[in-house]
Amino acid sequence: MSPILVRPVREQLEHDRVIRLLQQRWRRKYLVGINQGSETTTSVVYGETTYYPDVVLSPTGKPNKPEIVVEVETGESVNHLEALAQWARLAQLKAAFHLYVPSGAVGPARRLCTAHNIPVAEIWSYHLVGDEMRFTMVYKAPKPTRAARRPTAETLAARTAARPAASRPAAAVRGAQGVRAPAPRPTPPDRPDRSCRPRHRRRRSAGPGGPPGAGPAPAAAAESTPVRADGTGCYLISVPAQGAE
């Protein structure tokens, strides 16, 4: 029940009219429960305390799990007493808290929510245009972002203790678990370096009357110079001394 027990008749009629319009607006999407005037037909339980918001919106098939609670205020009920007695308590519920105020009371309502740290999800204003009531959303709380969890001291200590175990070789871990480690593979023998092998060169064919590999000899030298071979396979050329003739 609101701390303001007696409202002016005109404001009470306006208050109840807004509640009925919200019921018609949300009845296709939610199970809508309302409390007009001093009625206490729809309640929300928080701990050991029972609250009676003006409008309670619950998902279809789950009437005991309200999703949104709405409080409708008039010009006289936007004050510190109402904010501390109703808004602050309804904002503690798991359901989102929506506040509907007259268009001329939007500024005071937002200042009260800021001053008393009331986490309101949405603030709506309403006003009459002829015989039609119009609603305008003037504030919507940003969606909470998931902050990165910082590792605690216990988590850091556990990670540090797990690092030496993870750095051990696989053979040591298998031996500790009783699993036989595979035998090491034999190292292949070193192959000789092919660069040290002697290279075989093709010997050019000997010219007519000359040794193999010597190539064609000059014609004059071949006729006048005697050639002989020693035991090493080398060919020696004997040149006659001058004046022998």
Image (cartoon, rainbow, N blue to C red):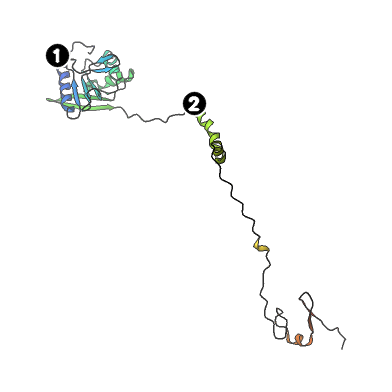
State the residue position of label 2: 154
Residue 230 % position (x, y): 79, 77
Query: Mark 2: which amino acid?
Result: Glu
Residue 81 % position (x, y): 27, 12
The residues bearing labels 2 and 1 have C-alpha atoms spaced at a distance of: 63 Å
Residue 207 sits above or below residue 34 on the image: below
Q: Residue furthest left?
A: 131
Give the secondary structure at mark 2: helix
Q: What's the residue at 27%, 27% (across, down)?
A: 139
Q: Of 100 and 185, which appears nearest the observer?
A: 185
Query: Mark 1: which amino acid?
Result: Val
State the residue position of label 1: 9
Q: Of 245 and 191, which appears nearest the observer?
A: 191
Q: Of 191 and 134, which appears nearest the observer?
A: 191
Q: Of 30 and 213, which appears nearest the observer?
A: 213
Residue 150 sits above or below residue 74 on the image: below
Q: Quadrant of the C terminus?
A: bottom right
Residue 96: quarter of image: top left
